[in-house]
Image (cartoon, rainbow, N blue to C red):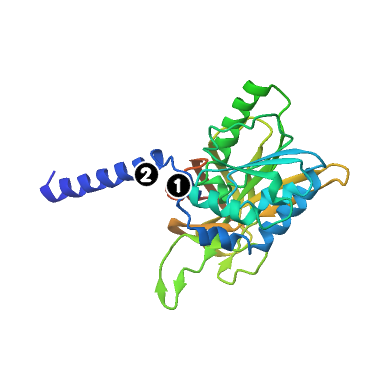
């Protein structure tokens, strides 16, 4: 091995080691590192706010006891306090603890919310609760530790109080993947980057050669593993160059059994570029696989993605 080759290999090994460290040592909670103005902007997200308020209005009954894990500005706890007799709002970031207390003091029923400065991975309420709200959600359940936190909470709660478990909000999470021909040209500058897209609007730079395919459904009342993976085929419905995968996450905030419907929250799409473009034709079968751990980095999912043509139609 030449000196130059050895140096390059050492650099690659070091980079791989750094990436592994970033994935395995990333034990922080995302909210700790988000500036306050980000949480303020979330209050202006009508898609988030209106659906959560509607779900809370349906699920929280008069006199209920409610726990919110990762309370942020306290807005969801405040919604719950309109009907609940008591709400515990747990927040680890001291800046957000002070901010949520300030806001709650300005709102009706805010006095029914106790803001607790604590680690949600360790906190348990002083008495059983009816509803647990946990809006620590990122697309594809990446970055945020919501799944790990809820699994941890359920074990500790049952050990302390026994059953039954409270109702969780969201109640379930449905995740899907979709191949894309994505325009990564920015005013003449080509840059295949990670993109976030707002749902329910036309994405002019995205061509969709196939419908989304559901790859995971998590019922938060049941036990869920942190390991998420998919290995499947998608039939393409048009000629295209597949160069990205779009990840879609729908949170089922509340199941309304009497009405036979749900209140959902579709969060921003995540678009990840593929390592290589794939030129395909109508009827081709695209094989897609990936695996990642809930709460891990976006890069860990991106590095695991594989896509190839399984078969092609005859000319």
Whether residue 126 is visible to the viewer of this picture, yes or no, is yes
Give x and y (percent) for residue 181.
53, 64
Whether residue 280 is visible to the viewer of this picture, yes or no, is no
Label 1 sits on a secondary structure element that is: loop
Mark 1 crowdedness (10 Å alpha carbons): few <14, some 14-19, many ≥20: some
Q: Residue at x 16, y 45 (%)?
A: 6
Residue 152, quarter of picture: top right
Q: Residue at x 62, y 56 (%)?
A: 103
- Residue 107's label in the rendered image is none
Decide which of 294, 11 is in the foreground and name it.
294
Decide which of 212, 79 is in the foreground and name it.
79
Q: Which comes sooner in the sequence, label 2 or label 1?
A: 2
Outermost right residue? 258
Residue at numbered disc 1: 297
**Disc 2 to disc 1, how far (Cα)?**
8 Å
Q: Describe residue 223's horizontal placement relative to residue 307 as left or right.
A: right
Q: Residue at x 45, y 45 (%)?
A: 304
Q: Residue 240, relative to residue 292: is it above or below?
A: below
Q: Quadrant of the N terminus?
A: top left
Label 2 sits on a secondary structure element that is: helix
Q: Describe residue 197's horizontal placement relative to residue 110 as left or right.
A: left
Residues at discs 2 and 1 in contact (Cβ within 8 Å): yes
Q: Residue 265, relative to residue 241: is it above or below?
A: above
Residue at numbered disc 2: 22
Give x and y (percent) for residue 227.
52, 35
Give x and y (percent) for residue 281.
56, 61
């Amino acid at each position: 091995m030449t000196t130059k080759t050895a140096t390059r290999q050492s650099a690659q090994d070091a980079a791989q080691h750094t990436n592994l460290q970033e994935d395995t040592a990333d034990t922080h909670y995302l909210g700790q590192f988000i500036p306050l103005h980000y949480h303020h902007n979330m209050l202006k997200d009508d898609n988030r706010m209106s659906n959560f308020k509607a779900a809370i209005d349906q699920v929280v009954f008069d006199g209920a006891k409610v726990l919110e894990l990762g309370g942020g500005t306290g807005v969801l706890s405040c919604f719950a306090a309109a009907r609940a007799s008591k709400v515990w709002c747990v927040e680890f970031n001291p800046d957000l603890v002070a901010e949520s207390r300030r806001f709650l003091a300005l709102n009706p029923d805010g006095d029914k919310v106790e803001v607790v400065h604590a680690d949600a991975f360790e906190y348990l309420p002083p008495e059983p609760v009816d509803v647990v709200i946990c809006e620590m959600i990122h697309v594809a359940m990446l970055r945020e530790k919501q799944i790990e936190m809820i699994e941890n909470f359920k074990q500790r709660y049952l050990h302390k109080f026994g059953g039954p478990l409270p109702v969780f909000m969201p109640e379930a999470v449905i995740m899907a993947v979709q191949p894309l021909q994505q325009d990564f040209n920015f005013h003449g500058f080509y840059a295949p980057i990670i993109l976030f897209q707002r749902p329910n609007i036309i994405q002019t730079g995205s061509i969709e050669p196939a419908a989304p395919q559901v790859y995971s459904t998590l019922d938060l009342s049941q036990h869920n593993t942190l390991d998420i993976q998919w290995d499947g085929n998608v039939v393409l419905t048009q000629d295209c160059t597949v160069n990205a995968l779009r990840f879609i996450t729908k949170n089922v905030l509340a199941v309304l059994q009497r009405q036979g419907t749900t209140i959902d929250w579709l969060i921003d799409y995540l678009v990840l570029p593929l390592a290589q473009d794939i030129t395909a034709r109508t009827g081709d079968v695209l094989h897609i696989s990936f695996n990642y751990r809930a709460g891990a980095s976006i890069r860990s999912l991106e590095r695991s993605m594989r896509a190839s043509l399984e078969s092609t139609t005859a000319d």
